[in-house]
Image (cartoon, grey):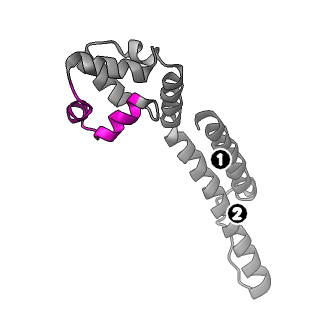
Amino acid sequence: MVFSERLKSEREKKGWSQADLADKIHVSRQSVSKWETGKNYPSIEVIINLSDLFGVTIDELLRSDEELKDKVIQDSKQLAHPKWKFFCDSVFMLGVFLLVSKIIIFASNYFFGTSVVIPEGVPRFLSNFLPLFLMVAGGIGSDYFKDKYV
């Protein structure tokens, strides 16, 4: 039995209308209607509430419909590591900022005769390659998380 049929069956066993069920789980009646017609699927939080309400296991609800199971898995992957993707994007942008800053300093020294220098205590390797390293590492990490979790 697919999820939509199971949901309708369980709701009718309780003698509830779609509006009654919607009120109990705090969603619109239209949402319940879409779930029962198979046009849409609920989130995992709603599935948990439905399983509690009907006295069935989440497994019974999820495994009844392959498409629903795939949706829940996909949703969980999208939420899995957004902080890591954001971190990698931030590292990349820091690298871009440092590279642009270095280019601006170089250009102002060359064209305007200014004498802006990178502080003495900073190793030459660090000032020359850190922006590039940050951009490459951030880009690879961001691309990895984008492909894996979206």
Give the mark nearest the N terminus, 2 or 1: 2
Residue 137, relative to residue 117: is it above or below?
A: above
Q: Residue furthest right?
A: 110
- At 35% from the left and 34% from the top, the residue drawn is 33
Distance between mark 2 and mark 1 Cα atoms: 14 Å
Question: Looking at the figure, which quarter contains the N terminus?
Answer: top left
Q: Tell me if residue 58 is in the magenta stretch.
A: no
Whether residue 42 is visible to the viewer of this picture, yes or no, is no
The stretch in magenta equals 16-36
**In the image, residue 37 lies at what x, y percent?**
42, 30
- At 62% from the left and 41% from the top, the residue drawn is 146
Residue holding disc 2 = 99
**In the image, residue 132 lies at what x, y percent?**
74, 54
- At 40% from the left and 20% from the top, the residue drawn is 5
**Neighbours of disc 1 within 10 Å: few (<14), some (14-19), many (20+):** many
Q: Which sits in the foreground, 117 or 12? A: 12
Task: Indicate left or right for 50 with 79 as reference.
Answer: left
Q: Secondary structure at mark 2?
A: helix
Q: Tell me if residue 22 is in the magenta stretch.
A: yes
Task: Indicate left or right for 86 with 58 as reference.
Answer: right
Task: Indicate left or right for 108 with 88 as reference.
Answer: right
